[in-house]
Image (spheres, rainbow, N blue to C red):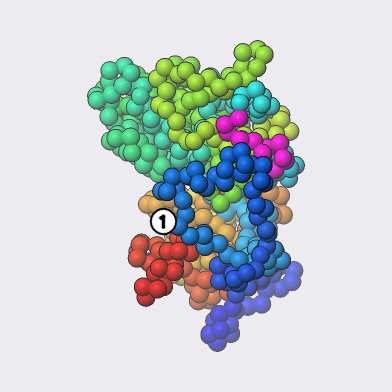
């Protein structure tokens, strides 16, 4: 807690019957594991190579070229098992996550409950010991699961074939842009069709990945209600249009029910339509990409289908296409001939690999198990509960002093991008201040993608996983912080007080001279200093 007398003196004690959680996170002044290293200490003894192996193939090292041999032993920490356990247990107590707190504040990252039984499946020796170079005949079970997940996602989306090779949503977007490029090149229009349309409220990676593929990015503006402007789109398409990529709902949570009119306009101009369904949490069993007029779409298995984010990976951006685009997918694809499952490697116009081997099998298994457990009716129910939870949250947050939600005032889908603009104007407290103060109540929220089109934003998505009581707890924390901002803004502006985190000096993030992403880099920088 801050020690300034002014701050502590003005802080109010939270009553025990208050809905805000009384929280104080554990804090350990824990060194990095390299600093705990003691020469000669061991956690495990690595066995020597058996004499039979040495006799038959040698020691292995002598057969390596000089360029691949280490000149000295790797600098690994020398530490006992007991101290390793203690070290990582302490670190775990300083970390919040979906298993510890109400994690509705990840915004477009979509944190939902991942059934622990699915973790048992993914961590079983049968999965853990798989190797990507095994012969197809030895992995028929995993290939069957992959193929059947493909069938499930075809049903959910209306697409004709899926690839699970992309390792993230952004990589799936890059795959979409690559397919667009290859498709037009195959028709002799690669040079002509160089314009890629997207919207301001779609994920920034849509524009970024298309730019990587050499496209000129054109933004379709939003109208006064936050929808993409259809008349503006009509004025932007031409014979140079390669594709239109959009999320629906966009990151505001606004669903465009006229989306088929947009895809029809693009198709009439000869372009392709790419659906960013990274978060389809409010759509399962209700709407499909095919009927909306899209040529391809992708799902983030680590969002919509309950796979843990796992600090950014391992993830899967499952990309699906209509039949005319199947030959452009990254190979190989998993197929079935009626007797066995196999890799289909011959794809006439494949864009080539976008990731080593064929994605992340444990992620595919988790998504498959989640869908099988819920069934078609369960998927639709999950989508409806996600929308119900979101609109309850939306109704309650609009009652908090200083909070608002720009654009349409009707129902939103599975998330909302809110604004603290009024709070900032009235008190000077910014969305970053509120974000830090939320950590004092064991909560987190995400602000927004840059640039901040919505001023002082915060983006929430409750998913179907959370109860009304948990949503009320989160709402109570935001309400409490709003009250603090109006009565004593210093409490919020000097947060966090109860968390182990500190206020990050953000200028460091833009200065490579201060970066040290490995222990070796840190030692070099400190030695230089």
The reply to whether residue 259 is in sight is no
Residue sticking out furthest to the top? 338
Q: Quadrant of residue 268?
A: top left
Residue sticking out furthest to the left? 192
Left or right for 508, reference 250: left
Left or right for 19, reference 456: right
- Image coordinates for residue 233, horizontal then vertical, percent: 33, 31
Q: Is residue 415 above or below residue 99?
A: above
User: Is-magenta flag for residue 48?
Assistant: no
Q: Quadrant of the C terminus?
A: bottom left
Q: Residues within 10 Å of mark 1 (few under 14, many from 20)?
A: some
- Image coordinates for residue 139, horizontal then vertical, percent: 65, 27
Q: Which residue is mark 1?
A: 455
Q: Quadrant of the N terminus?
A: bottom right
Q: Secondary structure at mark 1?
A: loop
Query: Could you tell me which residue is drawn at 66 percent across and 70 percent down?
Result: 26
Q: Is residue 117 above or below residue 286?
A: below
Q: Quadrant of residue 347?
A: top left
Query: Could you tell me which residue is drawn at 65 percent across and 52 percent down?
Result: 48
The reply to whether residue 125 is in sight is yes
Residue stretch rendered in magenta on the structure: 123-134
Query: Could you tell me which residue is drawn at 58 percent across and 65 percent down?
Result: 77
Residue sticking out furthest to the bottom? 5
Front residue of 265/101: it is 101
User: Is-magenta flag for residue 124?
Assistant: yes
Front residue of 456/270: it is 270
Left or right for 438, reference 123: left
- Image coordinates for residue 411, horizontal then vertical, percent: 56, 41
Q: Is residue 378 above or below residue 4?
A: above
> How many marks on residues?
1
């Amino acid at each position: 807690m801050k020690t300034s007398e002014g701050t502590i003196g003005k802080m109010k004690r939270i009553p025990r019957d208050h809905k805000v959680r009384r929280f104080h996170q554990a804090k350990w002044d824990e060194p990095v594991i390299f600093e705990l290293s003691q020469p000669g200490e061991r956690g495990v003894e690595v066995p020597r190579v058996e004499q039979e192996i040495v006799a038959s193939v040698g020691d292995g090292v002598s057969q390596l070229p000089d360029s691949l041999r280490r000149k000295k032993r790797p600098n690994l920490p020398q530490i006992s098992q007991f101290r390793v356990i203690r070290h990582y247990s302490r670190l775990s107590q300083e970390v919040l996550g979906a298993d510890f707190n109400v994690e509705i504040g990840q915004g477009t990252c979509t944190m939902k409950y991942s059934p622990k039984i699915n973790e048992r499946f993914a961590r079983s020796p049968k999965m853990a010991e798989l190797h990507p170079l095994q012969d197809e005949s030895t992995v028929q079970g995993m290939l069957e699961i992959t193929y059947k997940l493909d069938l499930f996602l075809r049903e959910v989306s209306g697409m004709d074939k899926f690839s699970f090779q992309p390792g993230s949503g952004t990589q799936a977007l890059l795959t979409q842009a690559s397919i667009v490029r290859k498709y037009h090149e195959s028709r002799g229009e690669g040079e002509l069709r160089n314009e890629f349309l997207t919207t301001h409220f779609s994920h920034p990676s849509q524009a970024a990945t298309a730019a990587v593929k050499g496209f000129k990015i054109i933004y379709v503006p939003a109208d006064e209600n936050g929808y993409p402007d259809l008349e503006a789109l009509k004025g932007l398409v031409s014979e140079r249009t390669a594709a239109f990529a959009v999320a629906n709902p966009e990151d505001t949570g606004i669903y465009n029910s006229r989306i088929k009119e947009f895809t029809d306009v693009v198709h009439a101009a000869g372009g392709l339509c790419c659906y960013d369904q990274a978060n389809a949490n409010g759509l399962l069993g209700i709407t499909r990409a095919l009927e909306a007029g899209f040529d391809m779409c992708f799902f983030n298995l680590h969002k919509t289908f309950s796979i843990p984010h796992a600090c950014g990976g391992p993830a899967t951006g499952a990309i699906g296409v209509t039949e005319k685009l199947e030959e452009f997918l990254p190979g190989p694809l998993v197929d079935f001939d009626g007797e066995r499952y196999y890799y289909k490697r011959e794809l006439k116009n494949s864009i080539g690999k976008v990731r080593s081997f064929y994605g992340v099998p444990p992620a595919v298994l988790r998504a498959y198990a989640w869908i099988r457990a819920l069934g078609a009716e369960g998927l639709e129910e999950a989508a409806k509960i996600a929308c119900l939870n979101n609109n309850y949250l939306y109704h309650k947050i609009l009652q908090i002093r200083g909070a608002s939600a720009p654009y349409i005032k009707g129902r939103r889908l599975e998330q909302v991008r809110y604004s603290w603009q009024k709070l900032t104007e009235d008190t000077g407290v910014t969305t970053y201040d509120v974000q830090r103060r939320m950590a004092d109540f064991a909560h987190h929220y995400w602000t927004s993608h840059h640039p901040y089109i919505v001023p002082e934003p915060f983006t929430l998505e409750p998913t179907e996983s959370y109860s009304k009581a948990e949503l009320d707890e989160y709402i109570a924390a935001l309400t409490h912080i709003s009250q603090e901002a109006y009565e004593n803004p210093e409490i919020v502006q000097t947060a966090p007080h109860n968390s182990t985190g500190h206020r990050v000096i953000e200028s460091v993030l833009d200065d490579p001279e201060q970066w040290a992403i490995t222990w070796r880099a840190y030692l070099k920088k400190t030695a230089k200093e």
